[in-house]
Amino acid sequence: MTTRGLTIENLSMRFDLPNGGSVQALKDVSLHLGEGELLSVLGPSGCGKTTLLNIVAGFLAPTEGRLVLNGHPVKGPDAERGMVFQQGALFEWMDVRANVSFGPRMAGRSERDWAEHVDHLLDVVGLRDFKSKAVYELSGGMQQRVALARCLANDPDVILMDEPLGALDALTREKMQSLVLKLWKETGKTIILITHSVEEALLLGERLLVMAPRPGRIHKEYRLPFADLGVGQDLREVKKHPDFAVKREEILSMIWDMEEEIMGRAEEA
Amino acid sequence: MIVFLLYAVIFVVSFVVVKFVATKAATDFTSLKTVTFGDESAVRPNRIASVISVLTIFLLWGAFTGSKLVPGFLHAPGPFMGDAVFTYTAEADGQRDDATVTVRVFEVGTDVDAPEVEPGDGWAKNDSDTVGAWRSGLIRVDRNDELGRDDGHTVVAVNGQPIAPGGSVQTEFGRVGMSPKGTLNFEPAKGWQMEPIWLPPPEAVWSRLNEIASDGYRDSTLWEHLGWSLFRVIVGFAFGALVGIPLGYAMGLSNWFRGWFDPIVEFMRPVPPLALIPLVIIWAGIGETGKIILLFLAALWIMAIAARAGVSGVAISKVHAAYSLGASKWQIMRHVIVPNSLPEIFTGARVAMGVCWGTVVAAELVAAEKGAGMMIMVASKFQLTDIVIMGIILIGVIGFGIDILMRLAEKALVPWKGRV
């Protein structure tokens, strides 16, 4: 019986620099993510969170350690692990519907096969009326909804999000956060979400990983109730939860300390 | 000089008139901006200025060539035509006598006779002769005089002003000079207009265009000449794109191809295609093959570099996104890399078409039996300036037309260009 979910074992990643030195981007990262879990990853810049995501996506091969998804090792990118980028990853030469149906079409499935699913997803993300628009005509928030729908249309086991809401304004961002929670609950996907925003990590992360830099490693892990509370709710209500403010302060000061340490080290050097 | 001065005056005057008199309240968003200086987006071509600019060129052209399209009062002073009269004073055997010279100045190309004049009194007789406008002519005033050169006939004054060999006297009809041997030389006033052999008036160019369009030039119709030039451009460009685009893709996708072709492409890019003409003629002769090879070479490097830039310019996140959506390498090539490179390729194609058009004209100037460049080259040898100017205008119009077509194609085929 194979275990479902994503297992990361002793993952290390070292980059060689052109000047002969090397950077330890990740060191001994181990983690198990059950099916349907939503993990948010926080950390100061340079802590290796994007590297971690790129390894899980298969764009990078780790120097050490291994990845197992639903019982088989991860080698290279695959449709089972979908990725949502911060921005600029949509195909401008296709309209909204062609973007969303990209995965099924590349798999060689006929339109009759995918049309219903794709149209349903366009409904879910609220872009039914925009399906024949060019993507460059849409606002930033709409473009990210296209990216979400495109990823879901492929029905991946794991969805990787690299600061998907980072480039959006505060209001749009809040709406999109609700949408992510809703999609998570409805589809039951395993999601890894990388973010810079502590609030976002708290709101969306069923589990929350704080990473520390140099070398990139797991600093602390939390299990949080807010994501479940937030499903279908006004996220501003969730933020009023007494525990929310406590956790936010705790994590913020943790990251602050790390940043200060980096600064201090930079000054010493 | 006077033309540039007039041009500047028209520029300033029309600017002032349009700005302060004729402009109604502007209603576009620019009018709401308080800061427009330095704001590039607020600078758009003033269409009134464009129209005046074109009209000015034709106006100046017409005015300085005496065109019938321009009302007479706007004409620059033309050359003197008609009968010019001046007097000379001759001296022979110690005696002085005056006589008049009447010169009929005619338009070159028409036949005129010298005017009839009374011989007059004295031993020096009145003379008459003809000179073409913009030309000059020697006038042997002593020919009909009773005392000739054997008697020491010398002209000492014109219109009462003393003249000596090598000197000259200005009269109201033009300049009267004296050659070193003492013969008078009349050069009628030229005015400010250009002679048609230097610059024909617009209507002459137009009628020449009609004539060549219906009768052809050098055994080929106008359309054949232009068609051959266009044909060479299109075939040369097509071959260049056919080889250059795959080459650029290969250079953008493979280290080996990049390394192999980089030195060649980077070396050939700055070599102007015109510099290849002699070599191409040596190798392939002056026929069609040579021209198409030349245009192929002109387009090849531009297209290769454009395709390479298009491939290199693809955002890695798009490629990653396609991979994680399950696309194969071939599908990524077909659905991501190729469409992503199209805007760059179109930019390259526009540049390449422009360069090819310029190169084909230059190649035809060197040697060709048919073509727009050949037409103006041959015409220039016979000083058929109207054909030369007509050819230049046609070459410009076609080059402009090619660019407009490329832009339309670009708008239709890659609407996302610049909107990412």
Image (tube, helix red, strand yellow):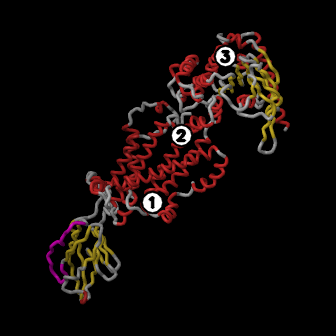
Could you tell me which residue is drawn at 29 percent across and 54 percent down?
A: B213
Q: Amino acid at mark 2?
A: Leu
Q: Residue at x 78, y 14 (%)?
A: A246
Does B380 sit above or below residue B141?
above
Prevailing secondary structure of the magenta residues: loop
Question: Mark 2 — residue?
Answer: B342
**Along the polypeptide, which appears first: circle 2 or circle 1?**
2
Q: Is residue B111 magenta?
A: yes
Give the distance between the C-alpha atoms of the residues marked 2 and 3, in whole angstroms: 37 Å
Q: Give the residue pinned by disc 1.
A: B363
With B209 as the anchor, is A27 left or right in this view? Answer: right
From this viewpoint, which residue is outermost toward the right?
A268
x then y, percent, for residue A250: 80, 18
Q: Amino acid at mark 1?
A: Ala
Q: Chain of mark 2?
A: B
Asked if one can make out residue A166 in the rendered structure from this viewpoint, the answer is no
Q: Is residue B306 magenta?
A: no
| Region rendered in magenta | B109-125
Q: Quadrant of the N terminus of chain B?
A: bottom left
User: Residue A123, percent across and down?
Assistant: 55, 17
Q: Is B53 in front, or is B371?
A: B371
Instruction: Give how far apart the Cα atoms at labels 2 and 1 are.
Output: 30 Å
Q: Could you say whether the residue bearing mark 1 is in a helix, strand or loop?
A: helix
Q: Classify A248 as above or below B49.
A: above
